Structure formats: C-alpha cells, structure tokens
Image (cartoon, grey):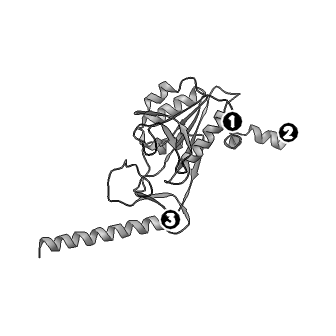
C-alpha cells in the first residue's frame, strides 16, 4: 500500500518520465518526450532503450527516421554503439502522421533533419493519445539551434539533454565540432568528420580554424602578388 507521500508522487506529472508510463489511463491525450544533445552523446541509444521497453510491455510501437539518414543502415535506427531497432525511413514529416495511426508509442530519430512540419505532426499524434519520443541534435556544427528542435523542445512535456565527453578536455561536451571545411548544414558523418567538444574547447577550436584560414588567405595573396 502506498504511503501518502508516495501516492502524491505517483500522481505528480513530474514523475511520469521516470515511471515511464506508456499508456495514459486517465486522459485521452498522449505526450511528447525529447532527447537532445551533441553528436556521440547517446541520444539514439536512449531512444532505442525507451522504445524497446515499450515493445517489451506489448505496446504497439512504430519508429521513423528521415530517409536521408543511411549511415549505418537504410531501414534500421542504429546507435554509435551498434544497438539497433527496425524503423521506417520517410522523406517528409507528413508521412509519419499517416503511418503512425493506431500506435501506442512513436519514436522519431534524427528529428533535426525534418522540416518544421514535424512539430505539428508530433503535437497531433500526442493529442490523439500517442506517446511520442523524439531524438535529435539541439545545435548544428556552428553552435546554432538546429532546425525544428527548439520548437519541439518548447512543446514537449519532457526534455532530456544528454552529453558526450569532450575529446580534448575530458569534460562534458555539448558542441558538435566539424573537422572539415564543408559548409553544408546537413552532412552525415562519424568520428572522421565530427568531434564532441566542451564549450571552452569548441570556441578554442573555432578560433584556431579562423587563424589558419587567415594565414591561408595571406599566403594566397602573396602568391598572387609576388
């Protein structure tokens, strides 16, 4: 039998994410959970963990990812630790609205690559009684909010920010530093292209890159005007 404090805690909305309720018994509405952070922070790992728990509980689960994400597999959602779960690749967010009907739980990986419609789709699914779990990068390689992620975080009931370990300082990392000079915003890659850095290490690396580019510009000018 629950004590009064335990009973109050059990009914408190703040404890739902820790109890991991997968079916809302008292309301018709579902909810949105967002898992965000830098590259190599364990976002997909946590998404897979929650989805597999829901599957173990015999919930009807559907998982989606953007069709552009083919790094490890065309159909599987795969973490950097090689844990995986079968998914449906979709080119646009609107496809999720159609394919997710009748589900108890919907998982969405790499949400930053979808257009802004993903926000309305997630809200519509939650309003229809579905638990929606979204994972994605909260910042791009420039350190700016990434795509629809800020709006998803704002509208979600629960937001979990996970961190990587800075490869240069050993501190918590929440920046994704791109090693190459490629300017494309959407660029899939692994450790060869990206490095998780702490705030101090990230801005130091950015300054060093700018200094190198300045030297290259000066050298090119000297070559052009000997």
Label drawn at residue 21? 1
What kind of element bears circle 2? loop
Dot 3 or dot 2, earlier in sequence: 2
How far is disc 1 from disc 2 in space, using C-alphas? 18 Å
Sequence-first tag of 1 and 3: 1
Mark 2: few/some/many CA within 10 Å (<14, 14-19, 20+): few
In the rendered structure, find residue 81 and report the number of the disc placed on it.
Answer: none
Q: Residue furthest right?
A: 1
Mark 1 or 2: in front is 1
Residue labelled with disc 2: 2
In this view, which residue lies farthest toward the bottom?
226
Would you say the residues marked 1 and 3 are in contact, meaning their CB atoms lie under 8 Å apart? Answer: no
Front-lying residue, 82 or 208: 82
Q: Residue at x 21, y 73 (%)?
A: 219
Q: Quadrant of the C terminus?
A: bottom left
Residue 211, placed above or below residue 179: below
Above or below, 119 against 171 in this view is above
Find residue 167 and name its label. 3
């Amino acid at each position: 039998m629950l004590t009064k404090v335990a009973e109050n805690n059990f009914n408190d909305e703040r404890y739902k994410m820790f109890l991991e309720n997968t079916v809302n018994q008292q309301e018709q509405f579902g909810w949105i959970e967002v898992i965000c952070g830098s590259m190599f922070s364990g976002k997909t790992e946590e998404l897979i963990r929650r989805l597999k728990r829901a599957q173990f509980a015999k919930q009807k689960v559907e998982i989606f990812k953007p069709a552009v994400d083919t790094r490890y597999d065309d159909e599987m959602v795969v973490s950097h630790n090689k844990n995986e779960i079968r998914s449906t690749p979709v080119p646009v967010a609107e496809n999720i609205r159609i394919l997710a009907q009748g589900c108890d739980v919907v998982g969405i990986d790499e949400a930053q690559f979808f257009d802004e419609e993903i926000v309305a789709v997630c809200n519509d699914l939650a309003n229809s009684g579905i638990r929606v779990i979204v994972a994605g990068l909260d910042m791009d390689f420039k350190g700016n909010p990434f795509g629809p992620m800020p709006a998803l975080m704002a509208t979600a009931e629960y937001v979990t920010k996970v961190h990587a370990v800075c490869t240069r300082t050993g501190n918590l990392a929440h920046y994704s530093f791109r090693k190459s000079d490629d300017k494309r915003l959407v660029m899939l890659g692994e450790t060869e292209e990206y490095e998780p850095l702490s705030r101090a290490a990230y801005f130091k690396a950015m300054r060093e890159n700018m200094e190198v580019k300045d030297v290259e510009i000066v050298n090119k000018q000297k070559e052009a005007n000997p």
